[in-house]
Amino acid sequence: MSEVTDYFGAGLTWVGPFDKENPDTIGLGVAAARLTDDAGAGFTKKYETSVEAFYNFQVTPYFSVKPDLQYILNPGGDASLDNALVLTIRLTVAF
């Protein structure tokens, strides 16, 4: 049994929105999953959807900082949970 019966995801990324030697990247995406209604699966909502936006600051050719903001509707397919706002920050060192 698969918990996800249908899935849709799409996104856009723009590299170099500002002229720089080390181009930054900005992106926006959406993902939607339809959840199974099989008995015993435990879902009380039929879907989960996430909308995400990020900006990757390329500080040097080898170091970047990427804040990411997500808004999740029906997290875990659980009606008892509120929609969630998630902020993460990723630091990347490439060598």
Image (spheres, rainbow, N blue to C red):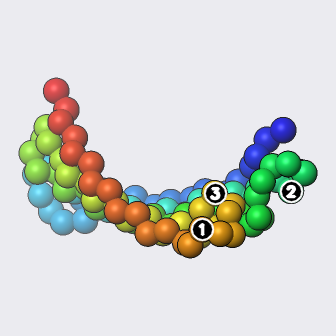
Picture coordinates of residue 50 (x, y %)? 55, 64
What is the secondary structure assignment of the residue under circle 1? loop
Crowding at label 3, few (<14), some or many (≥20) Cα neighbours within 10 Å?
some
Q: Which amino acid does the dot numbered 2 rest on? A: Asp
Residue at label 2?
Answer: 37
According to the image, label 1 marks what residue? 81
- In the drawing, what numbered circle is on residue 23? none
- At a point 76% along the width and 64% down the height, the residue shown is 44
- Disc 1 marks a residue whose amino acid type is Leu
SS for tag 2?
loop
Q: Residue at x 13, y 37 (%)?
A: 62
Report if the CB atoms under discs 3 and 1 are less than 8 Å apart: yes
> Residue at point 59% right, 62% down?
75
**In the drawing, what numbered circle is on residue 76?**
3
Q: Position of residue 87 (x, y in %)?
A: 34, 62
Q: In this view of the protein, can residue 49 be seen by the observer? A: no
**Is residue 3 placed above or below 20 in the rendered structure?**
above
